[in-house]
Structure formats: C-alpha cells, structure tokens
Amino acid sequence: MNSGRLFRLVICFFVIVLLAAGAGCARKKAPAPEQKRTGQEEQNPGAAKEAGYVGSTKCRGCHENQYSGWEKSLHRLMVQDAAKGNVILGDFTKKGNPFEIAKQYKKEDIVYAIGSQWKQRYVVKNKDDFIILPAEWIVATKSWQPYHQEDWDQPHRHYEDLCIACHTTGYHAELGAKINEAGIGCEACHGPGRDHSGNPSSQNIVNPAKLSYKKQIEVCGQCHVRGQEIKGKREDALGYVPGGELTSFIKPLTPSEEELKKEKPAFFPDGASKKHHQQYNDYVQSRHYTREKASCSYCHESHDGKGTKGEIPLTKPVDQLCESCHRPGEVAANVKLRKPYLDNYLPKRAKSATEADIRSHTFKPGQPKTPVQKPPYTE
Ligand code: HEC
Ligand code: HEC
Ligand code: HEC
Ligand code: HEC
Ligand code: HEC
Ligand code: HEC
C-alpha cells in the first residue's frame, strides 16, 4: 500500500468515527418539535436534518448518474406516498381486503404503500401513530392474505417500531423524527450527507467500496438481515450508520440448534433461510464470506433499476458473474460449478409472499432445486 492510500484510509477511518460520534451526540439532544409526517423527502423533518441527513434530492445536482439510476430502482420505490397515482396495487373490492376488519378506515386514509414486487402492505395514520392494515396484497396471486388480524391495532404493532428502520432513510427515534426519507435513499448506504453536500470531499462521505470487506457487507446487511436489537426489543439495527459495526446494533439470527427447534424456525436444517430479508444471515455462512470474496455490491448494482418494476440488476449477467472467478467445468477456487448457476446455487427457498419466492444466499452446493408449491400457501 502506498503512503497516499494509507493516508486516505486513515482519514477515512477518522471521518467515520466522527460521523458515528456526531450521530451519537445528535441523538442525545432534546426531541424536535412535532413534525408533519405525511410524505417523501420534500417534507424532511428538521429533526432528521440535525442528525445530518439531507435526503437524496440533495445529491442529485452533483451525482446525476447515480441518482437517475437509483431513482428507477426498487430501493427508492420501497415506501411510496399513496396519494401519488398508480401506487396502490391491491384490489379493495376483492374478498379478504383489510377494510373488512379495519372498518374505521377507508382507502383514502392510506398514507403509505410498502412494497410492490412480492407483496404490498398499507399504512394508515391515527393521530401520531402509523398503523399497518390487517391484510396484505399478494402480487403473484392477485389476492389478499390476512396480516396480524388479531393484534393489528395494538400499540406493539406500530410501523415506527417495527418497519421504519429498514424501509426508510435517516430515522432517529430519539429525535422525534418519525420519517426522514421514505424508501432506501442514498444516505442509507452512504451515511448522513449534510457536510459532504456543503463541502464535497471524499473524506466526509462513506463510499462502501473503500470499507473493509465485512463492513461493505454490513452496509447491505443493516436491512437484509433478521435478528434482535442489542440494546432493546426492536428487530432492526436502528442507530447503525454505514462504516459502523453492525453487530453492535443487532444480533443476527443463526441456524443454531435452538433456532431450528422453534415452531417456525427462520432457517432450514442446512442453514439456508426459510424467511425473507435474511440475505445477510445466509451470506455470512458462505465460503465467499469466509474467504472475503465477492461483496454484495460485487454482484448487485445499487445505482440502477430496470424494467417497469425497477428491479435492481446484477452487475453482469449471472453466468459471467460467477465465471469471473469460477471457470466453467473446471475445479477453480476448490469448486466445480454446474449450470444453471442460479437454480443450482441460489435456489428459491425462502418465503416473502408465496412459498419459495426468495433465493438462498448461502452458496452451498447440493441445495434442493427451486420447489414449486401450489396455493393455498402455508406459513
Ligand atoms: C455540491 C456537489 C455535491 C453534492 C451535493 C454531493 N456530492 Fe458527493 N461528491 C462530490 C464531489 C466533487 C466528489 C468527489 C470528491 C473527491 O474525490 O474529493 C464526491 C464524491 C462522492 C462519493 C465518493 C467518495 C469516495 O470516497 O470515493 C460518494 C459516495 C458521494 N459523493 C455521495 C454523495 C451523496 C450520498 C450525496 C448526497 C447526500 C452527495 N454525494 C452530494 C460532490 C457532491
Ligand atoms: C443500496 C445502497 C446504495 C444506495 C441506495 C446508493 N448507493 Fe452509491 N454506492 C453504493 C456502493 C455499494 C458503492 C460502491 C460501489 C462499488 O463497489 O464499486 C457506491 C458508490 C457510490 C459513488 C462512488 C462512485 C461510484 O459510482 O462507484 C457515488 C458518487 C455514489 N455511490 C452516489 C450515490 C448517490 C448520489 C445515491 C443516491 C441517488 C446513491 N449512491 C445510492 C451503494 C449505494
Ligand atoms: C431488519 C429489516 C426489516 C424489517 C424490520 C422489516 N423489513 Fe420489510 N423487508 C426488508 C427487506 C430487506 C426486504 C426485501 C428483501 C427480502 O424480502 O428478502 C423486505 C421486504 C418487504 C416487503 C415486500 C416488498 C416487495 O416489493 O414485495 C414488504 C411489503 C415489507 N418488507 C414490509 C415490511 C413491514 C410492514 C415491516 C414491519 C412490520 C417490515 N417490512 C419490517 C427488511 C425489513
Ligand atoms: C435501508 C435498508 C436497505 C439497505 C441499506 C439496502 N437494502 Fe436492498 N432492499 C431493501 C428493501 C426494503 C428491499 C425491497 C424493495 C422492494 O421489493 O420494493 C430491498 C431490495 C433489494 C434487492 C432486490 C431487488 C430486486 O430487484 O428484486 C436487492 C438485489 C438489494 N436490495 C440489494 C442491496 C444491496 C447490494 C445493498 C447494499 C449495497 C442493499 N440492498 C442495501 C432494503 C435495503
Ligand atoms: C470474486 C470471486 C467469486 C465470484 C464472483 C463468485 N465466486 Fe463462488 N467462490 C469463490 C471462492 C474464492 C470460493 C471459496 C473456495 C474455497 O473455499 O476454497 C467460492 C466458493 C463457491 C461455492 C462453494 C461453496 C461451498 O460452501 O462449498 C459455490 C457453490 C460458489 N462459489 C458458487 C458461486 C456462484 C453461483 C457464483 C455466481 C453467482 C459465484 N460463486 C461467484 C469466488 C467467487
Ligand atoms: C456472487 C454474487 C452475489 C452476491 C455476492 C450476492 N448476491 Fe444477491 N443475488 C445474486 C443473484 C444471482 C440473484 C438472483 C438474481 C435474479 O433472480 O436475476 C440475487 C438476488 C438477490 C435479491 C433478490 C431477492 C431474490 O431472492 O430474488 C436480494 C434482495 C439480494 N440478492 C441481496 C443480496 C445481499 C444483501 C447480498 C450481500 C449480503 C447479496 N445479495 C450477495 C447474486 C449475489
């Protein structure tokens, strides 16, 4: 390593420490005044700005390329303002719709639509609380499925406590800012960008590519994970900032004996995930991870969205991607891969909306091929 690079790394480290410390101090300040919590980044509450989050539109002027690609992606579209046209996919005239139970609400009360690819859930507002409606729309089958019908209106089911950290950007509960930017904005992966936007330098923004291998994976793992908060009862990594140590915020579930004995374990006995948002839990079991080869962003392009849905594309077609390290038909990196790579090594096994609609990321050979199960689907 030359001294210039070393110097930059050292500076980078200090910036990250400062950013993390800054976020920590900011959190101790008095709660900000009540915010209007209705929309997207244009309505950034001042409190979130205090923590240094400015919203993705702020980055646009100087990073048009990254912005225009990201804008089309499912990350941005994750949580959408329901008042905008074409956002709500569910057919509320169909049987099983949430208003059969949530009689006090109507379609016009929906403030956010969450998701669009596998399933969609809906959030309504009751005074200061965001409530998730008791049925979800399954995109593949165009039908409703019950969702927490027994306790949907209870205080422990609030959106802010259960969902917001993984589905929005810049949320700081202690500041009283309920929503900064709806969806996964630039700062979810790059950290708060106020200082950088005012005085751009590579030293006051996190570039995941310059972090250690494990920390790069943690940037994505802050949301693509299932686990238990270290300091509290949440099931997210609230408070984590890119560049930080993820496991100081969340204890990711592992396919331990104890977990596998549960009535509804999060894993299959071979360690692959049974539930969704567990790509991190899967990937840390792979030999890629132990050998520090191929980070999430080696394979996934965060600044692009394709088609009408906004799918986040691979950095290369899958065969080329694997063959950039594994030579076809040959033992390379101690393994001989067989095509089709996708179904052999990333079979659909976990469930988001319907049985086996999410791919495994353990990269273990010998997994069952993508199973096909017909409805009715079971948990
Ligand atoms: C006023 C223009 C401006 C704005 C606004 C701006 N940037 Fe930058 N950004 C730059 C410049 C210039 C650089 C290159 C800095 C350098 O190499 O010294 C840069 C570099 C970066 C890098 C790479 C850093 C590295 O170490 O490789 C990232 C990541 C980044 N910006 C993200 C963001 C994000 C996220 C936002 C919004 C929160 C943002 N930028 C807003 C001008 C801007
Ligand atoms: C889901 C995470 C994620 C989001 C969201 C995201 N980025 Fe990035 N960004 C990355 C990663 C990872 C890298 C490093 C890419 C690599 O490994 O080469 C990166 C790199 C960059 C760089 C350095 C130059 C480059 O392209 O490698 C800039 C500038 C940047 N991002 C700006 C932005 C801006 C602006 C936004 C929002 C419009 C944004 N990013 C949203 C993950 C993200
Ligand atoms: C620990 C982070 C985390 C938490 C907490 C979390 N999610 Fe998610 N969620 C994700 C990730 C990551 C995905 C996409 C990857 C996947 O499903 O494997 C996702 C997917 C979804 C989808 C499907 C998206 C689509 O396009 O089909 C919906 C809907 C959803 N989440 C709603 C919620 C709601 C509502 C809550 C709170 C009750 C919640 N999530 C809590 C991380 C999380
Ligand atoms: C702040 C939380 C968050 C972070 C950080 C994050 N993601 Fe996501 N990601 C999500 C959620 C939520 C979804 C579901 C989006 C949807 O389906 O609407 C998702 C979806 C995806 C998808 C699936 C999109 C598709 O086309 O099916 C990929 C791939 C992905 N993320 C990769 C990454 C990578 C790589 C990183 C790190 C560079 C990353 N994510 C960081 C929350 C996050
Ligand atoms: C950046 C290089 C790189 C890329 C890209 C890559 N691999 Fe690997 N792969 C490795 C290395 C290194 C090992 C570990 C070999 C060892 O432990 O000796 C490995 C191991 C594996 C294993 C064996 C794991 C085990 O536990 O036995 C499988 C299966 C695998 N890779 C599949 C894939 C597939 C499928 C792709 C494409 C989607 C891919 N790899 C892309 C480098 C890579
Ligand atoms: C070696 C390449 C590789 C690595 C590393 C990798 N993925 Fe993937 N990932 C894939 C492929 C291939 C797909 C399937 C894409 C498709 O269906 O077209 C995929 C699909 C996904 C999806 C979409 C959900 C699904 O099941 O269809 C998400 C979310 C995702 N990856 C997140 C991550 C995260 C987070 C990491 C890091 C912890 C990661 N990936 C690491 C290759 C990779």
Image: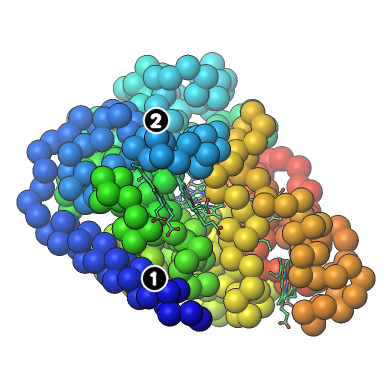
| Disc on the earlier residue, 2 or 1 | 1
Q: What residue occupies the far left of the structure in this picture?
A: 30
Q: Position of residue 370 (x, y in %)?
A: 78, 55
Q: Name the amino acid, label 2.
A: Tyr
Q: Name the amino acid, label 1.
A: Arg
Q: Residue at x 34, y 61 (%)?
A: 203
Q: Give whichever of 155, 369 is nearer the camera.
A: 369
- Residue 37 versus residue 53 in the image, above or below: above
Q: Position of residue 80 (x, y in %)?
A: 43, 31
Kindly indicate the quadrant of the structure image that contains residue 28: bottom left
Dots 2, 1 in contact, CB < 8 A? no
The mark found on residue 112 in the picture is 2
Describe residue 310's horizontal placement relative to residue 337 as left or right. left
The mark found on residue 241 in the picture is none
- Residue 268 versus residue 224 in the image, above or below: below
The mark found on residue 8 in the picture is 1
Kindly indicate the quadrant of the structure image that contains residue 27: bottom left
- Residue 117 versus residue 10 in the image, above or below: above
Describe residue 257's horizontal placement relative to residue 244 as left or right. right
Secondary structure of the residue carrying tag 1 is: helix
Q: Give whichever of 188, 126 is nearer the camera.
A: 188
- Residue 78 versus residue 5 in the image, above or below: above
Task: Specify whether residue 241 is in view.
Answer: no
Q: Is the C-beta of the residue carrying label 2 under 8 Å from the nearest atom of ligand 3? A: no
Foreground tag (2 vs 1): 1
Q: Is the C-beta of the residue carrying label 1 under 8 Å from the nearest atom of ligand 1? A: yes
Q: Position of residue 299 (x, y in %)?
A: 65, 58
Q: Residue at x 41, y 24 (%)?
A: 82
